[in-house]
Amino acid sequence: MENGSEELFYGFWPLMKRFLLLLLPLWIFLIGYSVGLNIIVASILAGVSVSIVAIFENLKLKREHEFIENGNNVIK
């Protein structure tokens, strides 16, 4: 029997990724600006936050690929 929670996560991630790519840089910029950082520094931190989402997605895909490959061990 397959785990149904993974199916829910895969359906939820594309929606969550779109929200994170849109709102995370804005939140980081506003937090940095309200703390008193220079506008340029706050903008750079906001831009870096987008790459964090992409890195997380790549790590998740690599783990999934390794899990699938471990299940395909066939003696030839």
Image (spheres, rainbow, N blue to C red):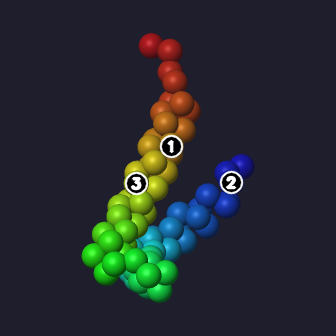
The spot of residue 9 in percent (x, y) is 58, 64
For residue 3, the mark is 2
Give how far apart the Cα atoms at labels 3 and 1 are: 12 Å
Q: Are there few (<14), some (14-19), or many (20+) residues within 10 Å of tag 2? A: few
Residue at left 35%, top 64%? 48
Mark 2 falls on what kind of element?
loop
Residue at 49% in and 51% down? 60
Is 39 in front, or is 49? 39
Q: Do callouts 3 and 1 mark residues in contact (Cβ within 8 Å)? A: no
- Residue 36: x %, y % from top left: 44, 81
Q: Is residue 50 positioned above or below 39 on the image? A: above
C-alpha span from label 2 to label 1? 16 Å
In the displayed image of the protein, which residue is found farthest to the top? Answer: 76
Q: Which residue is mark 1?
A: 63
Q: Are marks 2 and 1 in contact (CB under 8 Å)?
A: no
Q: Earlier in the sequence, mark 3 or mark 1?
A: 3
Number of the front mark, 2 or 3 = 3
Q: Nearer the viewer, mark 2 or mark 1?
A: 1
Could you tell me which secondary element the residue under label 1 belongs to? helix
Q: Give, as a three-letter code, the residue at label 2.
A: Asn
The C terminus: image quadrant: top left
* Residue 75 placement, left or right of 21: right
User: Above or below — where is 27 with respect to 71?
Assistant: below
* 10 Å crowding of disc 1: few (<14), some (14-19), many (20+): few
Q: Is residue 36 left or right of residue 51?
A: right
Q: Callout 1, which amino acid?
A: Arg
Q: What is the three-letter code of the residue carrying label 3?
A: Ile
Mark 3 or 1: in front is 3
Which residue reaches farthest left? Answer: 40
User: On the image, numbered disc 3 is attached to which residue?
Assistant: 55
